[in-house]
Image (cartoon, grey):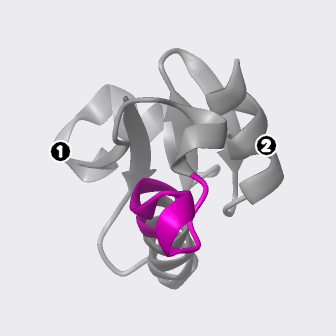
Amino acid sequence: MIITFFSRPGCHICDEALEALEEFIAEMNAGPATGGSAGSFTADPVKVDVVNIESDDELHRRYLERIPVIKVGKLTVSELGFDPEALESALRD
């Protein structure tokens, strides 16, 4: 499963959210045997695809005032930060 993380260089809120997201994913992918919880969300490992909104004018226009934006598939899970509860809910569905 792929989580898309929309960001841009120099965005300190994005940097903090990405760090928290990566920690969450690492714990989840580790599985229950090592204290993680992978089995409770998804059977497949989760990866993060970081997208620089400055690479595309449309992405820049759409997300500039909302980054960081986190999506699972087409579902927007959170904006302006990382919401672990919302992500957990999206991954369970």
Q: Which residue is the extreme one toward the front?
A: 33
Q: In the picture, which quadrant includes the C terminus?
A: top right
Which residue is rendered at x = 56% and y = 75% of the image? 20
Residue 33 drawn in magenta: yes
Report x, y in % for residue 85.
82, 51
Element type where label 1 sits in the image? helix
Sequence-first tag of 1 and 2? 1
Residue 42 drawn in magenta: no
Which residue is rendered at x = 56% and y = 41% of the image? 39
Q: Residues within 10 Å of mark 1 (few under 14, many from 20)?
A: few
**Mark number for residue 7?**
none
Which residue is rendered at x = 78% and y = 34% of the image? 89
Disc 1 designates what residue?
A: 55
Amino acid at dot 1: Ser
Q: In the picture, which quadrant includes the N terminus?
A: top left
Disc 2 designates what residue?
A: 86
Report x, y in % for residue 71.
53, 33
Q: Which quarter of the figure has residue 3? A: top left
Name the residue nearer the viewer: 85 or 40.
Answer: 40
Q: CA distance from mark 1 to mark 2?
A: 27 Å
Name the residue nearer the viewer: 60 or 86.
Answer: 86
Name the residue nearer the viewer: 65 or 68.
Answer: 68
The answer to whether residue 18 is above or below residue 71 is: below
Element type where label 2 sits in the image? helix
Magenta segment: 26-37
Amino acid at dot 2: Ala
